[in-house]
Image (spheres, grey):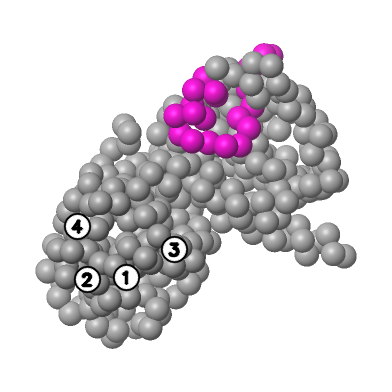
């Protein structure tokens, strides 16, 4: 029942040297999330994805791309840029997790505190945020989402096809396992 | 924020439910877009004719405060700079009155005109074949109209489905290709 006439596909393929990725490149299933750090639905999805990763292990590759809806979420853009700034210091996922675990505390001073907590070069981190060094990257993610049919957050793609069903753990895992099975057959 | 957690499921319900087969057929490409003049604020009106010479995106939507609409309009606000690259004007249209539109736009930080198809109710929606008489609201419908006032793309979604912005951007890109010939 998950197939609708609104099927959409990922317009920008996953790139190992560009994207933020957890899991092996040859995993049976790739799950791409377009997310907003201030979006409560993304916050709800965060532990579900962790659990799916724990259960599927090396069979799952997870990719996160930015889709800040700044008209609704005033801190979303800065938070996205903060994660990208952490990425330049090799700590994207650590920052990503901290942001989702502290969704209601995303003011500039909070972001600075997370950078300190992670032992980042805080001066560099703050400079990059102030100069919006990563705004282009965030926007590129956003546009790739728009062109892939992202219409809200979170939006998921499983092996390139938009997942239009619910993302409760059971449904999401079912869809991931199904994709893994059909990838194995092919 | 009344949208249910794990809300993507509701889209499927909408599509497999009664709204799947019954939504309207919009005016097809090549049709001259019916002109209109509607209020955008208590003391301002907007007419289609005033945008002759540039593309216009019409986003008909059912109601100001329903959750899917809000996501859709928030998304369009976010994508507005991309629409502007095509020199396109975005107009939202629903049967809500101007004061509702003003409050909605302020609450959601929307910076494009929301037009009130309010009196006679739904007249413009009817002219564009996207009025739902039973519900008394517009369909969730998109039109891209070219610089000469001709419909170049139209699309009606099931009411519960946010159509996103990709279709609009594609239509605007195609406009450029046709315009060059």
In reply to whether residue B97 is colored magenta, the answer given is no
Q: Position of residue A30 (x, y in %)?
A: 31, 73
Question: Mark 4 sits on what residue?
Answer: A113
Separation (CA) of disc 3 from disc 4: 19 Å
Point 28% across, 48% down: residue: A107
Separation (CA) of disc 1 from disc 4: 14 Å
Point 76% across, 24% down: residue: B37
Question: Mark 2 sits on what residue?
Answer: A120
Query: In the displayed structure, would residue A20 be above or below residue B153?
Result: below
* Residue A26 visible here: yes
Separation (CA) of disc 2 from disc 3: 17 Å
Q: Which chain carries label 3?
A: A
| Range shown magenta | B100-122
| Farthest residue, direction front | A123
Q: Is mark 3 on a helix, strand or loop?
A: loop
Q: Nearer the viewer, residue A57 or B81?
A: B81
Query: Is residue A47 toward the left or the right of residue A129 in the image?
Result: left
Question: Mark 3 sits on what residue?
Answer: A131
- Along the polypeptide, which appears first: circle 1 or circle 3? 1
Q: Residues within 10 Å of mark 2 (few under 14, many from 20)?
A: some
Separation (CA) of disc 1 from disc 3: 11 Å
Q: Which chain carries label 4?
A: A
Tag of residue A124: 1
Q: Position of residue B129 (x, y in %)?
A: 68, 32
């Amino acid at each position: 029942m998950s197939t609708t006439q609104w099927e959409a596909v990922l317009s920008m393929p996953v790139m190992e040297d560009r994207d933020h990725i957890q899991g092996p490149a040859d995993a049976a299933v790739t799950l791409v999330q377009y997310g907003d750090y201030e979006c409560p639905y993304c916050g709800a999805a965060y532990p579900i994805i962790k659990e799916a990763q724990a259960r599927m292990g090396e069979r799952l590759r997870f990719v996160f791309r930015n889709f800040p809806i700044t008209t609704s979420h005033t801190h979303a853009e800065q938070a996205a840029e903060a994660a990208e700034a952490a990425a330049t210091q090799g700590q994207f996922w650590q920052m990503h997790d901290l942001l989702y675990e502290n969704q209601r505390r995303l003011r500039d001073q909070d972001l600075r505190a997370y950078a300190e907590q992670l032992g980042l070069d805080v001066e560099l981190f703050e400079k990059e945020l102030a100069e919006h060094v990563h705004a282009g990257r965030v926007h590129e993610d956003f546009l790739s989402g728009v062109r892939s049919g992202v219409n809200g957050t979170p939006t998921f793609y499983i092996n390139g096809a938009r997942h239009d069903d619910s993302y409760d753990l059971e449904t999401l895992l079912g869809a991931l396992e199904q994709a893994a099975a059909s990838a194995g057959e092919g | 924020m009344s949208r249910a957690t794990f809300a993507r499921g509701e889209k499927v319900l909408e599509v497999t439910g009664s709204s799947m087969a019954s939504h309207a057929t919009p005016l097809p490409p090549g049709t001259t877009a019916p002109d209109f003049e509607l209020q955008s604020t208590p003391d301002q009106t907007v007419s289609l004719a005033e945008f002759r010479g540039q593309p216009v995106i019409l986003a008909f939507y059912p109601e100001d405060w329903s959750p899917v609409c809000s996501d859709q309009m928030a998304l369009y606000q976010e994508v507005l700079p991309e629409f502007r690259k095509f020199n396109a004007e975005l107009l939202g249209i629903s049967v809500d009155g101007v004061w509702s539109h003003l409050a909605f736009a302020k609450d959601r930080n929307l910076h494009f005109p929301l037009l009130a198809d309010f009196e006679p109710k739904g007249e413009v929606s009817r002219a564009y074949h996207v009025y739902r008489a039973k519900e008394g609201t517009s369909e969730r419908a998109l039109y891209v109209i070219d610089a000469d006032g001709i419909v170049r793309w139209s699309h009606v979604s099931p009411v519960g489905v946010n159509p996103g912005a990709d279709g609009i951007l594609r239509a605007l890109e195609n406009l450029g290709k046709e315009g060059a010939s």
